[in-house]
Amino acid sequence: MFKSFDVIAKKKIWFAFSGFMIAFAIFALVVFPFNWGIDFTGGTILELGFNQNVSVEQVRNGLRADGLETATIQLSGDIENEAGKDVIIRTRNLSADEAQTVVNHVNEKVGSAEVKRIETVGAVIGSEVTENTLLNVLISFAAMILYMTIRFEHKIAISAIVAISHDILMVLGMFALFHLEIDASFLAAILTVLGYSMNESVVIFDRIREAIHTHKRTDSFATLANDSIHQTIRRSMYTLITTLFCVTSLYVFGGDTTKNFALVMLIGFVSGAYSSICVATSIWVTWHEHERSERNERRRETAEIAEA
């Protein structure tokens, strides 16, 4: 099945589809603001004391009426069988009236609780940390370009970075469009996607590098790339399927606090496999074919001048 599929021959389709998706992601980023979580914006801490032992899941269900089911919930004091009487809830900024409404709903759905503390806290991840994170991502991009340039060539390095940027844009665009919450775990998931996409690109381009020395000199770059993809695509598909199985399980069964973390990886892993196989290799082939065409054109012009 895979060996009969000519990936490079359909490069115009990949470029058109990816171009549309990138434009759509940029549009979403411009039009729809990010939904920053309490790690970035700060929030409110509620400490409640119940008359009976309650579990984290019970409290989370009590917060659903106010749309706070993704809040960070922690048991404190004496804990028995993953239940306790003292609960600390960290959520977005709440006014005094909103906080009282939340307490009332928790009393109705979970049980009578005494309010021990209500505090407003600052952001855990400040602007300085965010800037440092972005700087580290840029440094990692530069390091990857340097590594792939030394190990392969600069055309492979740039092609891989374009594919990785494509994957990150897909994730950011989806989160902006659907107004999904961005918290500290989002940054960890983005870095995981970056590493996965990089690994997929390295596997394919490493096979291309080996094939350059074993293929006939008359073979086109498209033939070389297609053969390399066919030799590695099963491995890429098996890796994708197994990782998606784990991440999908985390998304479905992991609870509300891990859904966005798992969703980032779901989107990023699918996009990473697609961009590594279809986009990065197509860019590399197009770049080389363009350079070969220019060299042939210069030779033809030189030969015509010599004949004249």
Image (cartoon, rainbow, N blue to C red):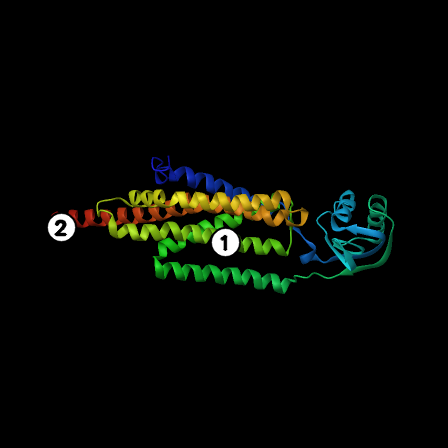
Q: CA distance from mark 2 to mark 1?
A: 51 Å
Q: Position of residue 163 (x, y in %)?
A: 45, 49
Q: Position of residue 204 (x, y in %)?
A: 38, 49
Vertical comparison of 226 with 210: above or below: above
Q: Answer with the quarter of the image where residue 74 lies.
A: bottom right
The amino acid beneath tag 1 is Leu
Residue 178 visible to an observer of this rendering = no
In the current view of this chain or complex, which residue is farthest to the front? 81
The amino acid beneath tag 2 is Ala
Question: Which type of secondary structure does the marked residue at label 1 adopt?
Answer: helix
Mark 2 neighbour class, 10 Å CA radius: few under 14, some 14 to 19, many 20 or more: few
Q: Position of residue 124 (x, y in %)?
A: 68, 62
Mark number displayed over residue 20: none
Q: Which residue is mark 1?
A: 194
In the current view of this chain or complex, which residue is farthest to the left? 307
Q: Which tag is nearer the camera, tag 2 or tag 1?
A: 1
Question: Which type of secondary structure does the marked residue at label 2 adopt?
Answer: helix
Q: Residue at x 83, y 45 (%)?
A: 105
Q: Nearer the viewer, residue 27 or 249?
A: 249
Q: Is residue 200 left or right of residue 47?
A: left
Q: Residue at x 54, y 63 (%)?
A: 135
Residue 183 visible to an observer of this rendering = yes
Q: Position of residue 9 (x, y in %)?
A: 34, 38
Q: Is residue 150 left or right of residue 62?
A: left
Which image quadrant: the N terminus? Answer: top left
Q: Which residue is mark 2?
A: 306
Q: Nearer the viewer, residue 261 or 136?
A: 261
Q: Residue at x 64, y 54 (%)?
A: 183
